[in-house]
Amino acid sequence: MSGGDVVLRATTVEKEYPSRRGPPVRALRGVSLQLERATTLGIVGESGCGKSTLSRLMVGLELPTRGQLDIMGEPVHPGRALARSIQLVFQDPFSSLDPRVTVEKALTEVLTVHHLAPERAQRQARVDELLGHVALSPRHRDRYPHELSGGQAQRVAIARALAVEPEILVLDEPTSALDVSVRAEMLNLLVRLQGELELSYVFISHDLSMVRHVSDIIAVMYLGQVVEQGPYADVLDTPRHPYTRALAAAVPVPDPGRRPSGQVDGAGAVTMVGEALTAGPAGPTSDGCPYLPRCPLAEQVCAETAPQLGAIGPRHRVACHVALRTARGLPLSEDVPV
């Protein structure tokens, strides 16, 4: 996959939701990202980090509280024009497809609303073409969602998104509701479609192995912020932020003889990586680093000043005081606990 010009850009995007008690809930805290044409931007992070909120802002379902989102150099304005440029594929296809509408009607409605196929014959031909794109046959036209398997329903959802000929697809956990046996097929389908139609993807997931398979650039989110981003080889093979290191170490490895990653305490006991992800409060306790309550590398500066994304390579950036300092001098030691 090779990129070119930027088709989507987020600049210090923030999103707040009102709260009945206390201050507003800050779902996004100054997120800045960019997506290049015909490439895939993978966004990873645990549940509640703001991934889905960001996806809704990208397609105009919600507006940012502060900051700006641009598509093809133009600010995001909800409406049909935006829908023609960017489409969202939801996690659960059965919740996004109308159970009372056949596959053919679901696709023809999109074509009719956007005035893409005025003649009936044109619409039927376009429906067959869209089904062919997602490896479904014309016999699926008359089926209702409940008559489809999970993989088939997600293919229909992708076909519906492709009906308006968008340049960008935002894929919000597109395989997590599918059987494991179907996930590889779905990923291969997405890769093929990107090559055939020159699509740009925002691939949102908590599964690092899937993100690695399809992504050119990866952004790691924690509590509404991007804490590390760059090419997948840099972010996943040589992670610098302690949260990214914990995520990468927690990926299961098919090797029964391999000792789990972790740190060894004074008594020789191994502290599992999972504890590093769950220990401590799940939110920032000060104006400092949001990862402070869980971080094994924390220093005094981390409690006083929130780190900003800084460059540690040609396209590799990290928001961590310790990682930035060590990357500009000596690399992080291999025995640093995650």
Image (cartoon, rainbow, N blue to C red):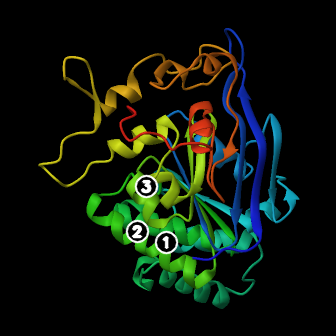
- Residue 234 shows which numbered tag? none
| Residue visible at 66% across and 59% down in the picture | 314
Circle 1 sits in a helix, a strand or a loop, which is it? helix
Q: Badge 2: how crowded within 10 Å, few (<14), some, or many (20+)? A: some
**How far apart in space, not on screen, are marks 1 and 2 (Cα)?**
6 Å
Question: Which one is earlier in the sequence, the residue at label 3 or at label 1?
Answer: 1
**How far apart in space, not on screen, are marks 2 and 3 (Cα)?**
25 Å
Question: Which one is earlier in the sequence, the residue at label 2 or at label 3?
Answer: 2
| Residue visible at 72% across and 83% down in the picture | 117
Q: Badge 1: how crowded within 10 Å, few (<14), some, or many (20+)? A: some
Circles 1 and 2: CB atoms closer than 8 Å: yes
- Side of 70 where 226 appears, left or right: left
Which of the 4 quarters of the picture holds residue 146?
bottom left
Q: Which residue is mark 2?
A: 186
On the rendered image, what quadrant is the N terminus found in?
A: bottom right
Q: Which residue is mark 1?
A: 190
